[in-house]
Image: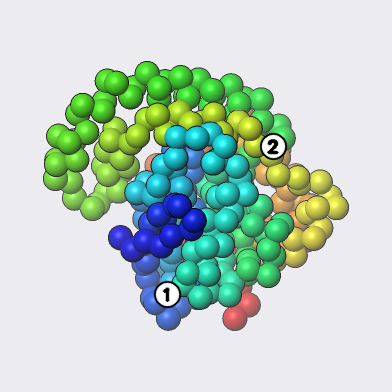
Amino acid sequence: MPTFERGDLDLHYAERGDPAGPPVVLLHGLTLSSRMMERLAEALPQHRVLLLDLHGHGRSTRPRDPACYALEEFVADTIALLDHLEIASAVIGGTSLGANVAYELALVAPERVEAMILEMPVFARGYDAGRAAFLALAGLFAGLHPVLTPWHPVLRRVPLPRKPPELNIGRDFLVADHLAQSALMRGIVRNTTPPNDEATAATLTMPTLVIAHAHDPIHVIDDAEETAARLPNAELVRASSFLHHRLHPHELNDHVVRFLDGLPT
């Protein structure tokens, strides 16, 4: 897996699809890794798909300082990937944390964002539920550290196939630095949610696909619907729950493929 440096961070990424195709960066959700986006990447063979492990995730550096996990630091990871590969602009998409990073990147550097894919963005209505959940996870991860760490060498040696990616996602969770995971959770709750008021949204004119999920207290569907309505060039897809596209990934893939095929060339 190729790497590049951003300050004292080593960031890992993978490339899929056509190296000469239009670039698409896909960003994973909180505590997960770029493996989460492998199924979608397979559906985009005509694109140059870049799967980034944000710091604190996957194989990238995992600081144990909560201050390292400001949202703008994840945005900097993504811009650094584009700079490393000398890509002027790309489609930026993500799920949950990845969606917020994509949105924030479009706010601070819109010239780098050809289009956005926002699955399960977290805005103001989900903040309180998210803060409670993430603080609980911070305690859980701290408690798991002494239990799982002695088993890491054994777990890393267990051979696993590349597919399905969920097998490796599960092992990634078990062999993670759980003190770093705890710091990640404590750092995430220090962030405020990105602004999605009418004036702010009106500045984001790039084509955007918003994918909203019902019955989710953190990724509140009302926030996603409101954001899609305020963005000048957005379309909205609704799913019945977070699990819907996890259990039926081909449906998510179809929505994304259709959206990308409709972008101006």
Side of 141 where 126 appears, left or right: right
Tell me the quarter of the image containing the N terminus: bottom left
Q: Residue 194 has which mark?
A: none
User: Mark 2 falls on what kind of element?
Assistant: loop
Give the residue displayed 46% in from the left and 72% down from the top. Answer: 85
Residue 194 at what x, y percent from top left? 71, 44
- Give the residue number, with chain letter if any, for mark 1: 46
Mark 2 or 1: in front is: 2
Q: Amino acid at mark 1?
A: Gln
Q: Is residue 118 above or below residue 263?
A: above
SS class, disc 1: loop
Q: Amino acid at mark 2?
A: Thr
Tell me where residue 262 appears, x and y as whole percent: 59, 72
Q: Position of residue 68 (x, y in %)?
A: 54, 41
Disc 1: CA contacts within 10 A as few (<14), some (14-19) or many (>=20): some
Q: Quadrant of the C terminus?
A: bottom right
Q: Nearer the viewer, residue 182 or 37?
A: 182
Q: Which residue is mark 2?
A: 192
Residue 150 position by quadrant: top left
* 2 or 1: tag closer to the N-terminus: 1
